[in-house]
Amino acid sequence: MAFDLTPEKMNSWNEGGLPHMLGIKVTECAPGRVVGRLPVTKPLIAGNGALWAPAIVALADTLCAYGVSTKWPDGANGFTTVELKCNFMGTLNAGAILGEATLLHGGRTTQVWDAKITNEESGKLLAAFRCTQIILYPP
């Protein structure tokens, strides 16, 4: 089967939803890999002057979730997240963050995805994210 996904198609999936409201944009996609960007805007800055941690998690989780669609097992028709974890190494208060999600394990019943979140300007690692998806099949 040919790979027919594009960043534009992925960006249309949640128009009006959380990724759209936050400003998340997919910039690249390929089987087992999705890349995206989130501009750091004033509403995403916490009271301490740094980027809210949930904004970082939202970018990582969105990219990993979209990634599932790049590597569907035969017969699958959905998925749900069963676990996620994020370690933070830094933050910022201006500019943009980049995320790259990659498939670590693509089984018939589970997928495990990793995402690295970096400062767009410096390339510094800000967060390491991992999630596990259960793959669903029709009854």
Image: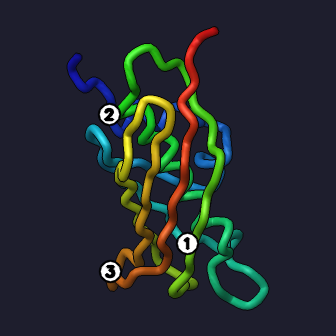
Q: Are marks 1 and 2 in contact (CB under 8 Å)?
A: no
| Closer to us: 27 or 106 | 106
Figure quadrant of the N terminus: top left
Q: Residue furthest right?
A: 47
| Closer to us: 136 or 32 | 136
| Amino acid type shown at disc 1 | Val
Q: Position of residue 105 (x, y in %)?
A: 38, 47
Q: Residue furthest bottom?
A: 48
| Closer to us: 97 or 53 | 53
3 or 1: tag closer to the N-terminus: 1
Q: Disc 2 versus disc 3: distance between alpha carbons?
A: 25 Å
Residue sitting at x 36%, y 52%: 104
Residue sitting at x 67%, y 40%: 17
Dot 3 corresponds to which residue?
123
Dot 2 corresponds to which residue?
6
| Amino acid type shown at disc 2 | Thr
